[in-house]
């Protein structure tokens, strides 16, 4: 290793040490009321995370000398029966119908209504995990895609038809970005009348369903679904990390993990969608921490002085916080790209931003898993009794209505271990993807490694911030 490289890595390691020491000495695993009794102090976790990232970088630069992830290396596993796809589609339609029906007809008490837990836990948190484990499962279950495909099949049986409009290329993924930001705003910002009110969620779900049907009717199912359906685009993006996928012939196949994301097509709004996944989760954690609780009243008073009532002032304050976190993530990545370009002028900043954007996807999933792990582990158990009593009216359809959530299924310390492991795994995966892409872009291996000092700095920043968010919740 050259002297300059040793100096640079030494500087990065020193910076990591400063970050590690600056992190709080106690931590609260997200979603838990009460402090975790950790077997080792948080600063030691932070130092370990710093060392893992640096060691991973050194190992990649010395042992990973040729691209390994640009080709998927697929192997067909099994052919699914054709009726199974429609069976999954019918199941998705049934679940959507139950969400809407229980939202409108059920008790307007969030914990007792099927729709609230299903949307905020199973759908929003569980599906990303399933997507990474088993591929794009949402594509098979999407209720609006099922209805749109059925509608087009019926229409084409009568006469040969094509979508009346062509999807504007310049629009790209921006509608999907708006959809994800809108859902995050509903979950984290919206107050009036009640973001958790089942009838409100049912009405919004129905409105989204109709909007997707209209879009797919005008622009085509696949064209609209891949770019404008926020949830479809989000889950598909994460599914590219999976080692399992469905090939063009409908068969379940295996591929080298992470290799599916390297072929990601980067168009207008794609980078923004990736940063949005990280940014919205970042704000969810940040808004539960002590820094935000100290800052929030001051921001609210500013809007109150401008003449806004209490509710709009709160919503504007949280909206500002959400926008800040989105900008922070996008700005950090852009700063890293500026650094990469300083190594070689062969590519401009826009090209580099698109070429390395895929390396942020595993970080996005890492933030989601670390932040929502305890929520998913505990609240998903509620589906056992909510399935028996979806309306909250005392029914017991499957004999599980009296079941309860077991909060002792895992210790607080174990949750913290999983959260840290998720963050580290995601960032190491991001490093590997960035390094692999650099080997393709730069003919000189040493030049490729030098360009990745900056991507290492980006990963360090995201890891440190993620650990800080986990450790500062409730402090």
Image: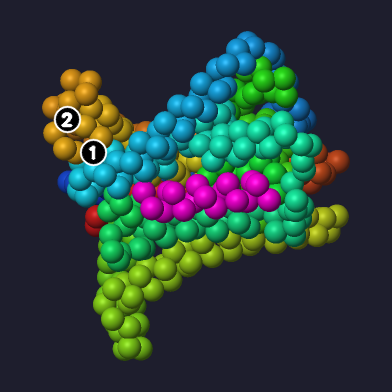
**Residue 150, above or below 268:** above
Label 2 vs label 1: CA separation? 8 Å
Q: Quadrant of the C terminus?
A: bottom left
- Crowding near pointer 1: few (<14 within 10 Å), some, many (20+)? many
User: Which one is nearer the viewer's eye here, 57 or 71?
Assistant: 71
Residue closer to the observer: 225 or 366: 225
Q: Is residue 207 magenta?
A: yes
Instruction: Please give left or right for residue 193 compared with residue 285 in the image.
Output: left
Residue 108 is left or right of residue 176, and the answer is left
**Residue name at image x 40 percent, y 37 percent:** 97
Main SS of residues in magenta: helix
Using the image, determine if residue 230 lies above or below residue 161: below
Residue 96 in view of the camera: yes
Check whether the beta carbons of the residues at disc 2 and disc 1 lie within 8 A of each other. Answer: yes
Residue 252: image location, x then y, percent:
62, 18
State how many labels appear: 2
Q: Is residue 153 magenta?
A: no
Q: Tell me where the magenta segment starts and ends, as one range.
A: 202-218
Secondary element under disc 2, as helix, strand or loop, is loop
Residue 393 located left or right of residue 257: left
What residue is pinned by disc 1? 391
The residue singled out by tag 2 in the image is 395
């Amino acid at each position: 290793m050259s002297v300059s490289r040793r100096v640079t890595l030494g500087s990065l390691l020193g910076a990591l040490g400063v970050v590690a020491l600056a992190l709080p000495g106690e931590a609260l695993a997200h979603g838990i009321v009460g402090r975790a009794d950790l077997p080792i102090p948080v600063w030691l976790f932070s130092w370990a995370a710093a060392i893992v990232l640096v060691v991973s970088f050194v190992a990649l630069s010395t042992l990973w000398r040729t691209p390994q992830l640009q080709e998927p290396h697929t192997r067909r596993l099994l052919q699914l029966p054709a009726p199974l796809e429609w069976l999954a589609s019918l199941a998705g339609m049934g679940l959507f119908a139950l969400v809407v029906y229980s939202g409108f007809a059920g008790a307007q008490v969030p914990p007792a209504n099927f729709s609230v837990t299903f949307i905020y836990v199973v759908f929003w948190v569980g599906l990303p995990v399933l997507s990474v484990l088993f591929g794009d499962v949402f594509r098979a279950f999407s209720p609006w895609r099922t209805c749109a495909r059925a509608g087009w099949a019926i229409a084409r049986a009568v006469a040969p038809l094509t979508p009346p409009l062509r999807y504007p290329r310049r629009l790209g993924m921006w509608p999907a970005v708006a959809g994800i930001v809108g859902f995050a705003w509903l979950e984290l910002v919206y107050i009036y009348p009640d973001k958790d009110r089942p009838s409100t969620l049912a009405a919004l779900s129905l409105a989204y369903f109709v909007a997707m049907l209209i879009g797919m009717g005008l622009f085509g199912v696949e064209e609209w679904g891949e770019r404008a359906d926020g949830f479809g685009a989000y889950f598909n993006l994460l599914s590219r990390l999976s080692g399992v996928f469905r090939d063009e012939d409908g068969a379940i196949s295996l591929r080298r993990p992470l290799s599916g994301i390297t072929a990601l097509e980067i168009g207008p709004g794609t980078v923004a969608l990736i940063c949005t996944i990280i940014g919205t989760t970042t704000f969810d954690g940040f808004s539960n921490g002590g820094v935000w609780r100290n800052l929030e009243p001051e921001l609210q008073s500013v809007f109150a002085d401008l003449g806004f009532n209490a509710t709009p002032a709160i919503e504007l304050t949280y909206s500002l916080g959400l926008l800040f976190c989105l900008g922070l993530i996008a700005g950090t990545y852009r700063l890293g790209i500026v650094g990469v370009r300083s190594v070689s002028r062969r590519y401009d900043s826009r090209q580099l931003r698109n070429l390395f954007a895929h390396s942020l996807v595993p970080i996005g999933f890492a933030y989601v898993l670390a932040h929502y792990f305890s929520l998913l582990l505990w609240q998903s158990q509620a589906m056992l009794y909510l399935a028996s009593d979806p309306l909250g009216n005392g029914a017991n359809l499957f004999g599980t209505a009296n079941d309860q959530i077991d909060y002792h299924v895992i210790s607080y310390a174990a949750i913290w271990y999983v959260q840290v492991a998720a963050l580290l795994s995601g960032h190491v995966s991001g490093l590997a993807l960035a390094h692999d892409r650099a080997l393709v872009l730069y003919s000189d291996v040493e030049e490729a490694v030098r360009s990745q000092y900056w991507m290492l700095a980006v990963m360090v920043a995201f890891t440190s911030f993620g650990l800080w968010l986990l450790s500062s919740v409730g402090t």
